[in-house]
Amino acid sequence: ASAAIPVLCVFDSEEVGSSSVQGAASKLLETALSRICAGLGLDEQVMLSNSFMISADNAHAVHPNHPEYADANNAPVMGGGVVLKFNANLRYATDGASAAVFRKLCRDAGVPVQTYYNRADLPGGSTLGSISVGHVSVPTVDIGLPQLAMHSCYETAAVADVLYLETAMTAYYGSTLEVSAQAYFLK
């Protein structure tokens, strides 16, 4: 059993703008966490310093008709596992430490992990994780399920990846974050 307080936040309006009342750029997550702490008599700053956020969305799989759009060494494929997303312009919140925590979580759960680096010479979108950390500054990892035709009416993904994500998130919500002076990790 976990000693953590698991929280799931599902934002709305993201395809038309994160700054709606219920979007990632709103105070929704920050206010909800403050109210949880107040209701449980917890110190909010201590709670946040012992928190870890997973921003889960979709990720670009290498497209068979346009492989040139993918980084040749980091081209996720459908059915290959959950994708860790990186962006040199910080449009994704993943950093080395949060990636290591997520990789360990997945390794312990038997979930394969792929890596996606947005090519620096091609514009890319942002994620709810990078938007949310502007209001709730906690270590965050951006992940996704590899798919083709993102934002199309015919998005394509693999069922196996959905099952991998379910396994990873079950492990995550059953874990407790351990913080030390040197590092943080999930137990």
Image (spheres, rainbow, N blue to C red):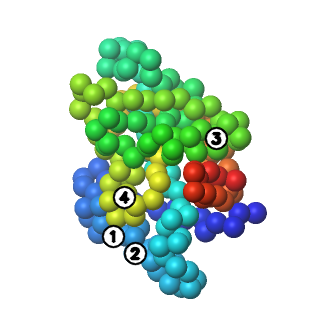
SS category of the residue bearing label 2: helix
Nearer to me, 175 or 23: 175
Q: Are marks 1 and 2 in contact (CB under 8 Å)?
A: yes
Q: Position of residue 112 (x, y in %)?
A: 62, 31
SS category of the residue bearing label 1: loop
Q: Mark 3 points at which residue?
A: 104
Q: Position of residue 142 (x, y in %)?
A: 45, 44
Tag count: 4
Q: Where is residue 115 in the image (x, y as percent from the top left)?
A: 48, 29
- N-terminal of the pair, mark 1 or mark 3, is 1
Nearer to me, 59 or 47: 47
The alpha-carbon separation of the residues under discs 1 and 3 comes to 31 Å
Q: Mark 4 points at which residue?
A: 132
Nearer to me, 138 or 151: 138
- N-terminal of the pair, mark 2 or mark 4, is 2
Q: Mark 1 points at which residue?
A: 27
Q: Please, what is the three-letter code of the amino acid marked with disc 2? A: Thr
SS category of the residue bearing label 4: helix
- N-terminal of the pair, mark 4 or mark 3, is 3
Q: Nearer the viewer's eye, disc 1 or disc 3?
A: 3
The tag on residue 31 is 2
Residue at 50% across, 23% down: 77
